[in-house]
Structure formats: C-alpha cells, structure tokens
Amino acid sequence: MNVTTADDTTSTGQAGPLTGTTDRGTWREFFVEHAIKAAGISMIAIVGLIFFFLLREGLPTLGEVPLGALLGTRWYPIEELYGLIPLVIGSLLVTAGSVLIAVPLGLTTAIYLSEIAPQWQRDILKPLIEVLAGIPSIVLGFLGWVALAPLIQSLGAPTGLTAFTGSLVLAYMALPTIISISEDALYAVPKEYRDGALAIGATQWQAIRMVVLRAASPGLVTAVMLGIGRAIGETMAVMMVTGNAANMPAFGPAILFEPVRTMTATIAAEMGEVSQGSVHYHTLFLIGILLFIITFAINSLAGRLIGGQEQRRKRGQI
Amino acid sequence: MADIIEVRNFTFFYGSFRAIRELNLSIRANQITALIGPSGCGKSTFLRSLNRMNDTIRGTHVQGEVLLDGQNIYAPEVDVTELRQRVGMVFQRPNPFPQSIYDNVAFGPRVLGMDRTQNLETIVRESLEKAVLWDEVKDHLRTSALDLSPGQQQRLCIARTIAVRPEVILMDEPCSALDPVATLRIEDLMRELARDYTIVIVTHNMQQAARASDWTGFFWLGELVEFRETADLFSNPREALTEAYISGRRG
C-alpha cells in the first residue's frame, strides 16, 4: 500500500531545476571573473619573467669570472677587473648613512605630528610632507650637487661629492615614506591606550614611549624598512652627488666623506657603453641580481618582524 | 565619616557648551558613590573632571573648585601626574595595553619609579590578588593581556590602577562591555576594594547603583538633581524628576 506523506510532495515538489534559466548576465559574470584572474596571473608571470631575465643575463658571469675576482676590491672593467666589493660597500655606506639620518628624524617628526602638534600645525605639515614625496629624485640630486656639495667641501672634505652627500639626499628622499607610514601607525593606536597610561600618572612622554611606540612598533618597522628600500634602490640622485669613484674607500673616521659609487649608479652609468653579451654586460646584470636579493631580503625581514595577522591582533594592531 | 573630595560651584565647559553647571557635592572616603542619569547628562564628564582626564580634550575649561584632601586639584601648582596617581581611573571598555599581564600591572610602578624602592614582583602580585585575578593568571603572567576574557581584562585594569596605591578609583561604566557574570564579579570586587579605597562609579544600570553603592547622585542636563544615601534615594526619592527616572518614566 502506498502511503504518500506531505513530505513527499514538498521534496519532489514543483520548484524548478536550479540551472539558471534566467539570463541574468551569465556572460558578464564569466568575463569579469576571467579578466580578474588573468590580471592576477599576469602579475605573477611578469615578476617571474623579470627574475628569469635577470638570471639569464647575469648568471653567465659566474662561469666567465672566477668568484675570487668578483670578490676583489677593484672595479675596472676595461682591464677586466670585476671586483664588486667597492660597489657593495659604496651602496652600504650611502644607505647606512641615510638610514642613520632619516630614521631618527622621520620617527621624531611622526611622533611630533601624531602626538604633540596642535591641529593647525598638522594641517600645514602633512601636505608639505606629501609635497616633499612628490619632488622628482633628479631635482633633489640637482639640489645636492649645487647646494649641498659645496657646503660639505667647505667643511673640510677634499671634495663635496661624497658618500655623506648621497646619504643626505637619500635621507630626504626616504623621509616622506618614513614619516607618513609611521604617522599612520601611531595614529592607529587607540586613544584608550593613551588614556589608560595617563590615568595611572604617566607623563605624556612616558605614555608615548612605553605604550604608544610599543603598540605601533610593527608599523614603525615597516616604515623604516620601506625607507631603506627606497634608499638602496635609488639611482639618479645618488649618481649625481657621490662622486662616482668605484674605489675602495679608506676605512677610518672620515669614511663617509670620500667619493664612492653605488651598485645602482654603476649599472646606470655603464649599461649604455657595454656590448650586449659581453662579460661586462653579464656582470652588470649580476649586480642587478644582487640588488634584487638585498631588497627581497629586506622586505622578507620586514614581513617577519611585523608578523602575521594573529600576532598583530594580540598586540592590538588590528 | 570624612569627606575625601569636596566639589564647590563646579562648572565645566566644552568650548562654549556648559556641560556641568554649579555643582556642589561631597564624596565620603571608603564609600562607593554611584552617579546615574541619562546619556549626555554630564556624569561621565564630571567623573573625568575628578582626575583631570578632561585636560586631554582640547577647548575645555572649568570654573569652581574640586578639593582632594582639602587641596584644589585645579590650582596652577598641581602636578597632574601626581593627581592621577592618587585618583586612578577604570574605563568603560577594558583597555589593557597590548603587552604582557605582568607589564600591564608593572606599568604604573615603573613610570612612577616605585620599582626603585620596592620589589616590583611583590607589587604586581599584591595588586592582582586584590583585583581577584591572581589565581587565574599566576601561571602565565608573561602572556599577552589581550588573550584574557573581557571580564578578566577589566579586573586587570583595576589591578593596574591599584598598583600605584591610589586613594580614589574612578570607574566609568566599568561593566557596560561585560556579561552579567563578569559584572557581578566586578561588583563584588568593588565591595572588597571599598575597604581600602574610595570608589566613584558612573553607571547606566540602576540595579547596579542600587546593589553596589552607598551613595547615589542623580544627574540631569548637567545638574545634580539629588544626592543621598543609595537606599534612601531609591526607596524614597525627594525630587519628582528622580522618581520618574528611577522608575523608568523619564530618561
């Protein structure tokens, strides 16, 4: 005997099949989805291709020039001397100098803007900093060459075109990045933390130092790392003001006041003069690979220090 | 019983807006005083005036006096940080610093330099014990305070406040972000703390005021309408406005 329950009629009921018979932009949906996918994949492909190209052009050097020679202290391609050390040291000196100038200056400016400055000063300073970020690097290089170099020479350096001149110019280039990102990080620290500190009897500086800066530290690290990234990759301005001498600087107290040449400046200066496929050409690409590795390492270090979402949540960053 | 805080003709302005008008009030030592009233009636502003937390808001100014142990806290020679050490504050939303439990409690003693003359670990332990949190956290003092439940976080904030040995603890709706169980624990804790400290609490919850306080002040539009012992105020309000508010007809 067949028993038909109410359930039977509803479960096998009159509702139509879910096959999307209405033509509600199925094609548009398809198109948008695939366009987005293509954009994402092409990004990955481009990065991959750049890296592949760098490797293809740069790696042959390792077969053409012995490793010992690459680690030599003389860069003199005409005599087939491809020692990279002076260039690496040049980059490190200029970058380290600019970091030493830009980080303290940038962080203190950000603290002043976010914690101390009255509103009207913020309203003036913040746009000014944006303007500083917008100055083309070549203009800053020009200023460094015309104004800064003579000043440094008048202080007693044999020439005004030194690693220190480059550091100053780079520091001013990295400052807007450092200031605006650290200011954002400080601004994101909830007011409740400041109130909590003040309500216990902390002075404003104690509240900033022991609570606000600690809570904002991941953002501050990002700011510094991006600033360093900006400095180490910069080319034109540095090329104009560092004297462009690919010599080993004499180590000593005045090491920052000697002409140097950075890795980036070397590539820019010599790329136009080499014949494609030569040893010199391959070596310039090897320098490119080295720069790529250094910036990649800085970025990964920043990522490691900032930590994942979970860690940031625990520190009250999100 | 002695008055620890005496407020005389106190008027408070946000810019040109007068948030509190001509207030007179005495707060007894070692008692719990509750301030009730509808939102925007000035009770939180008044609470924040008692340790000058309103100084952090631009464009505010006051008239009149607030005497703490006979000294006007708005006098120009007053050191605000010392005032806030003596008059601590617990906020509406638990606001532990994004640091370890230990560092949270040690914060006050460190900024005030108490750790130079006293053992910091003892201070931290005693404060957590007084806040009835010690047994729950003693095994993980070095983990982040943000991993605690909201109720634990609020008790941590109380521990952080009492670590600097204040005389008065101000509480600005300390239970509004907590569930009923955590709320009752805080109320029990307030009873305990009233033996050593004077407590002033702002609350939206009239049952809480009735349950937990000795004195109750009713604020309405920036004025103190009625201020009496809690039992009297709730059972036998003198003002018609008070009666209407506590019975739920106004507010």
Image: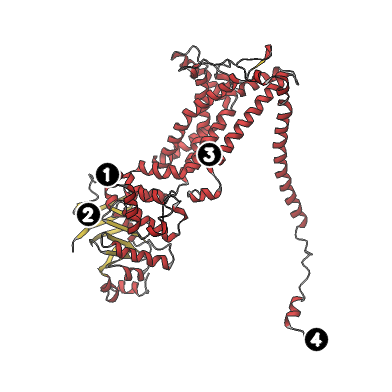
Asked which quadrant contains residue A269, the reply is: top right
Residue occupied by mark 3: A222
Please tell me which of labels 4 and 3 falls first in the chain: 4
- SS state under label 3: helix
Residue type at numbered disc 1: Thr
Residue occupied by mark 1: B117
In space, the residues marked 1 and 3 are separated at their CA atoms by 39 Å
Position of residue B207 measured from the top left corner of the image (x, y, whole percent): 36, 71
In space, the residues marked 2 and 4 are separated at their CA atoms by 89 Å
Position of residue B148 measured from the top left corner of the image (x, y, whole percent): 45, 57
Are discs 2 and 4 both within one chain?
A: no
- SS state under label 4: loop
The chain under label 3 reads A
Please tell me which of labels 2 and 1 falls first in the chain: 2
The chain under label 2 reads B
Q: State which mark lies toward you, 2 or 3.
A: 3
If the image is split into quadrants, where does the N terminus of chain B sit? bottom left
Point out the residue furthest to the right here. Answer: A1
Residue occupied by mark 2: B68
Label 3 Cα neighbours within 10 Å, binned few <14 / some 14-19 / many ≥20: many
In space, the residues marked 4 and 3 are separated at their CA atoms by 73 Å
Residue B90 in sight: no
Are discs 2 and 1 both within one chain?
A: yes
